[in-house]
Image: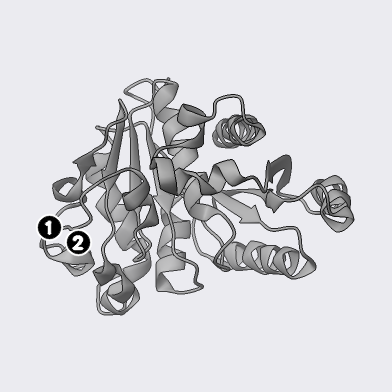
Amino acid sequence: MCAKSDPVKVVAAYNIKGGVGKTSTAVNLAYLAARDGFRTLLWDLDPQGSATYLLKAEARVKGGGRALVVGRRTAGDAVRSTEIDRLDLIPADFSYRNLDRELGAAENPTKRLHRLLTPLRTHYDVVVLDCPPSASLMSESIIRASDVLLVPLIPTGLSLRTFDQLTEFVGTVEGRAPQIVGFLSMVDRRKRSHRDLAATVPRDHPGVRPVVVPSLAVVEQMAEHRTPVPLFAPASPATAAYEQLWDHVREAWS
């Protein structure tokens, strides 16, 4: 566990593309961090609020995202507890769809998220960000605030092209760049193309770890159970994959 003197680690589940498994990744890794004794905060930045739903949290923050961005409310005011020990949540609501516009009107917009997180650094060891799919002011603010950028990739050539574009984008951002931890998500080993990419992508793409999250019904069943996979399916290959990914995240921030 992080000592209190250690800086909080910010891990963002992010991809320019949608539908690649960001929310399931964020929720399961936040759970694993809390399970391992880290004081953990999950911030749901996606206006769809899927992580908020999965963790059974109230989906409304007074004043919405604008109140946070313009400074009328602090991030700490928005924190909600969850049913999981050591895991708190800042919920999303539909007002988050306007965050880019609000950031555009703010001073130093790409540093705003970092500043919002700063007061929370004495309360948490790990902050996990569940990010909306975009390449925008919010994206740059997320990259500036993060220590690790966690990038789920579906096993297609276009997804890998997007990963390379993201890597280039991160390289253009001023200041300290986060460690990029890519991994394959939604892999169906019955398909030869998926098996081939699972074998070759970590070798050919620096930043992609040899982690394969399988395409299994148990991941989709998170929406029915409204709880992380390791809690209701501890023996599932999906649980093993998320635990392996969590090990790589801890290695990256070390």
Mark 1 lies on residue: 73
What secondary structure is marked by label 2? helix
| Vertical arrangement, residue 217 with respect to residue 160, above or below | above
Colour scheme of the rendered structure: one colour
Mark 1 residue crowding within 10 angstroms, few (<14) / some (14–19) / many (20+): some
Residue 88 place in picture, x, y as percent: 28, 37
Number of numbered discs: 2
Residue beneath the point at 58% across and 62% down: 170
Residue beneath the point at 45% across and 21% down: 36
Q: Tell me if residue 148 can be seen.
A: no
Residue 3 place in picture, x, y as percent: 37, 20
Residue beneath the point at 53% across and 65% down: 173
Mark 2 lies on residue: 68
- Name the amino acid type tagged 1: Arg
Q: Is residue 206 left or right of residue 244?
A: right
Mark 2 and mark 1 in contact? Answer it, CB < 8 Å: yes
| Vertical arrangement, residue 146 with respect to residue 168, above or below | above
Q: Tell me if residue 16 can be seen.
A: yes
Numbered label attached to residue 241:
none
- Name the amino acid type tagged 2: Leu
